[in-house]
Image (spheres, helix red, strand yellow):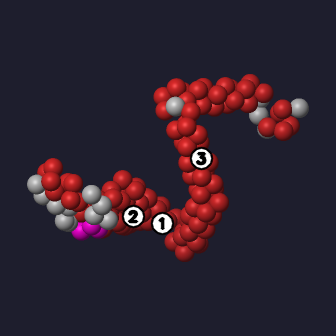
Amino acid sequence: MIRKLYGANPLHFVGHVLAFALIGYAAVQIAGIRAAGNMAVWLVGAVLLHDVVLWPLYSGADRAGRRLLGGAVNYVRIPLGLSLVLVLVFVSTLLNKGDGTYMRVAGRGWEGYVRSWLLVTAGLFVVSGVVYLVRRSRR
């Protein structure tokens, strides 16, 4: 019955239920009941945002890229993905959030982070383009 509904071995299902129970217990023990509830709300919101909004967006973009570029899409996909990861890591820095605090602690500002991110992104695309051209010339 579970195999038909779940699509896998019943032990797989039981393992997942136990893992989620353990994660919930750990969250309550570490953060407290109220914070664990907030964490659950954020997790559900993030899952819904990803599955309902972001997944269709980047799946459609990837499909269009494959139609447009064919096999060369990976030479655009990889530097673009790395560049977006850098944006996620440094978003507050790129938007100059907390510059005053950083200035008081380090004695210098955050000027130049956007320029540096753009240079790193350009470098990623240049390296990817060179690799593509080298591999294409070998064929």
Q: Residue furthest left?
A: 107
For label 1, the residue is: 72
Q: Are marks 2 and 1 in contact (CB under 8 Å)?
A: yes
Q: Is residue 101 left or right of residue 86?
A: left
Question: Which quadrant holds the N terminus?
Answer: top right
Q: Give the mark, 2 or 1, whose residue is nearer the N terminus.
A: 1
The nearer-to-camera label among 2 and 3 is: 3
Horizontal and vertical percent position of residue 89: 36, 53
Q: Are marks 2 and 3 in contact (CB under 8 Å)?
A: no
Q: Residue at x 59, y 46 (%)?
A: 41
Please report the bounds of the magenta region as a residue range.
Answer: 114-118
Q: Is residue 82 above or below residue 114?
A: above
Of residue 112 and residue 83, the one placed in the foreground of this image is: 112
For label 3, the residue is: 41
What label does residue 132 carry, if any? 2
Q: Calculate the distance from the C-alpha at mark 2 to the C-alpha at mark 3.
A: 43 Å
Q: Is residue 76 above or below residue 14?
A: below
